[in-house]
Amino acid sequence: MDNKTVKEESANEKSLNFIQQIIEEDLQNNVNDGRVHTRFPPEPNGYLHIGHAKAICLNFSLAQQYQGKCNLRFDDTNPVKEDTEYVDSIMEDIKWLGFEWEGEPHYTSDYFDQLYDWAVQLIKDGKAYVDDQTAEQIAEQKGSPTVPGTESPFRNRSVEENLDLFARMKKGEFKDGEKVLRAKIDMASPNMHMRDPLMYRILHAHHHRTGDKWCIYPMYDYAHGESDYIEGITHSICTLEFEVHRPLYEWFIDNITDTEYRPKQREFARLNLSYTVMSKRKLLELVTDGHVNGWDDPRMPTVSGLRRRGYTPAAIRNFADTIGIAKRNNVIDVSLLEFCVREDLNKTATRVMGVLDPVKLVITNYAEGEEEWLTIDNNPEDENAGTREIPFSRELYIECNDFMEDAPRKFFRMTPGREVRLKAGYIVMCEKAVYDADGNITEIHCTYDPKSKSGSGTEESKRKVKGTLHWVSAKHAAKAEVRVYDRLFNDEAPDGHKDKDFKDFINPDSLEILKECYVEPCLKDAKAEDHFQFTRLGYFSLDKDTNADQLIFNRTVSLKDSWAKAQKKK
């Protein structure tokens, strides 16, 4: 092998993340017949967030990369917290992100009968027993990482008694918490998870799929590996906190199965994002306490919230690819996520003009009642995006802060005696502002140069001016409500303070609702989740609350990272 080939192979190895390297090695050794079969196993007790999106991208992309399969499996072993609403939302989010699972969705509840039979077999093998102690007693007897645990007084029950009690647990003869089934492993193990872990608990609760058939439900550590085994999963990729659970994962499989095939659990660092909380419990708290307007509030880090805010699947997939797969936990700056959506929308979003804080601009030398249509690019970044026609008339709306009566020298917008260009239109000269009795500006008057029309090729049109303003025709504009979203928290680690509640750091300015906005008339035909760049203002998406009487836009992200600049000033 020549040096060039060696260098190329070395470069390829370096470009692989450690999960890919594991898979490559397994394929070379024909582990599990050289198959790659992954899974995404959410618990249907809440909506997916950006951290889940990272796991989705990883598992489904690995299956695609190695011509394998990826299952969607709902870990529905806790009927108290689960609901079909969450099942439906999870499936919708995965499809929206651009992925398809193998076959029909799977459910751990599909395997309840098999899991029960395997538990019975463990009892028969003397490897599981029924414990009558309370959760508090069991926890107390666990010991510590440096102190061995204490064996349960019920640990040496006979196989016959354990079988009888477990069967009666299944029949519903005992109350919640009255008994549990535990694996009999090693109460002196240095790994606390191996100290006779729980396998089943009693829960008299209606299950969203199995109804009232069961009143005992398997614990995650037991159901996880066995479900992987049943489905033929080859690479069970979990987040880092499950690394210490791996010996238990393998113990259950080794003591139940009798085949050479083994699913392999490997762990990667979960996504931690600055200025965000990722705990489903805390996100639920935000929803139930009314700090946000539901799981899909555009300030939430949920996939549905990001989608409603105007994020694109491509931006989220690119974000997941950019941050990569790590072995150690770290915090990713949320500005990287914002950068990814800016980068995608810059290429794909139609440029339109909208005025969020309008003041009327009257062109005094433009004929009353006259109008014309100007040609403007839909997206200068995309040569195939084409052009559209926009109306121009005597009265326009411009942004209020684009005018200043007594402007400093470096103010390149509208001020008396200075020329600016109206985008795609004409060069205008500001004459004066008109005020009401309270001193508020009601109108700005200007004159235009009829020969300065953009793109006309005249000498006047080529005249250089330092400012270009966006505008909309007052006669033609569509009225809109614009919701300007910012980060939900004003602290980099809102849940990282032991002495404070994470809700203490909620940003009071995370939402500003602007009722009197005007946009181009073409936006009347927009559909929910359509993306636009409002010239000079940012990226916006049409909200699902829009109706025939009211256009509603959500600001996805500003044109630049204004937050970082503001924080530096502070």
Image (tube, grey):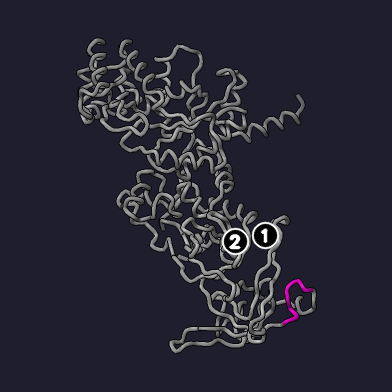
- Residue 281 is situated, as x and y percent measured from the top left of the image, at 35, 44
Q: Is residue 564 left or right of residue 75?
A: right
Which residue is labeled 1 in the image? Answer: 379
Q: Where does the N terminus fall, quadrant-wise?
A: top right
Q: Which secondary structure, mark 1?
A: loop
Q: Main secondary structure of the magenta part?
A: loop
Q: Toward which corner of the image does residue 431 lie, by quadrant?
A: bottom right
Residue 235 visible in rendering: yes
Element class at badge 2: strand
- Height in image: 73 above or below 296? above
- Within-10-Å neighbours for mark 1: few <14, some 14–19, many 20+: many
Residue range in magenta is 450-456
Q: Which mark is residue 42?
A: none
| Residue 151 visible to the viewer | no
Image quarter where the C terminus lies is: bottom left
Of residues 328 and 263, which is closer to you in this image?
Answer: 263
Of pointers 1 and 2, the one earlier in the residue sequence: 1
Q: CA distance from mark 1 to mark 2?
A: 9 Å
What is the x, y in percent for residue 6?
Answer: 72, 28
Which residue type carries mark 2?
Gln
- Measured along the vertical axis of the image, is residue 32 above or below residue 6? above
Direction front: furthest residue: 548
Q: Is residue 501 magenta?
A: no
Is 275 on the left or on the right of 560, as rendered? Answer: left
Residue at 41% across / 34% down in the picture? 241
> Residue 409's quadrant in the figure?
bottom right
Q: Are marks 1 and 2 in contact (CB under 8 Å)?
A: yes
Give the residue drawn at x 30%, y 26%: 214
* Residue drawn at (75%, 80%) of the image: 451
> Residue 533, which numbered label?
2
Where residue 268 appears, as percent x and y from the top left, is: 49, 34
Q: Position of residue 342 (x, y in %)?
A: 58, 55
